[in-house]
Image: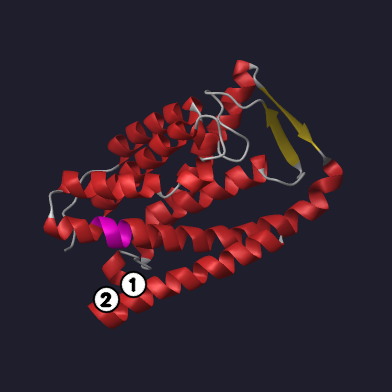
Amino acid sequence: MIDGISTGIINYILFGLVLLIGRVFFKKDARSYLINLDKRGWKLFGEGVLAGFILFLLYPIVLLILGIGTFEVVWENLRITIPIILSSIFGYIAVALFEETLFRGCIFLGLLKKYSFKIAIIVSSIIFGALHFFSYSATANFWIGLINASIIGVLLCLIVAYTNSLMFPIGYHLAWNLTQSLLLGRYDGFINFHFQESVLTGSKYTPESGLIVTVILLLMYLYINKKFRPVKLEQ
């Protein structure tokens, strides 16, 4: 629980610094980063939360179907799981706000003002993937993690381009991280999944370093192209 609160405080501070720097040096407000708190924005946020939850849930389902993962339900841990969920929501909202504002709201949109759409999406996504190096460096297949993180960056940039809003990516980012933490976290929770690290599964703490997540991201791409249509981004 303390980890979630401390993560939240740090990332809320970083998010605030991004907004402060944008306000002081570039005269930008939250709407300039496409953080839309209107009815449509909250709808996109909710759709992002649902998409992130369902897509990550496919990961343990695939493990079970392939017979390479097991899970256990520990009823006595239900009491301690609830405060962990609440603190994790607090923390991962902050992470989603900071990272999406920085990588999509600042870097991607900033590059888009000077370069083509392809260059903006590729460069911002490579930066997003590369900065996850330290998260994945301890895993045997860290290079898959870096590629998958970059693919996630591409997909989230596409959603920003299709919706002219950061709200869906914020919701998606929150739900993916939260679901991953609750099912594969460092603590013994109410539901716990177990599997061996491999090129398919990745590791317990970084499933993105496995090819199963790569397939899930392909499904996400198909979902994005079916659901959304491109709109003209506000410059």
- The image shows residue 152 at horizontal and vertical percentages of 38, 42
Name the spot of residue 70 as percent of width and height, x first: 71, 25
Kindly identify which residue carries mark 1: 30
Q: Give the residue type that dot 2 points to.
A: Lys
Q: Residue 188's quadrant in the figure?
A: top right
Is residue 212 found left or right of 183 in the rendered image? Answer: left
- In the rendered structure, the answer to whether residue 214 lies left or right of residue 33 reads right
Query: What is the x, y in percent for residue 169?
Result: 39, 52
Q: Residue at x 24, y 77 (%)?
A: 26
Residue 180 included in the magenta stretch of the image: no
Q: In which quadrant of the rendered view does residue 44 lie?
A: bottom left
Q: Give the colouring mode of the picture.
A: secondary structure
Q: In the figure, is residue 125 to the left or right of 4?
A: left
Q: Residues within 10 Å of mark 2 (few under 14, many from 20)?
A: some
Dominant secondary structure of the magenta stretch?
helix
Nearer the observer, 226 or 108: 108
Range covered by the magenta-colored residues: 104-108
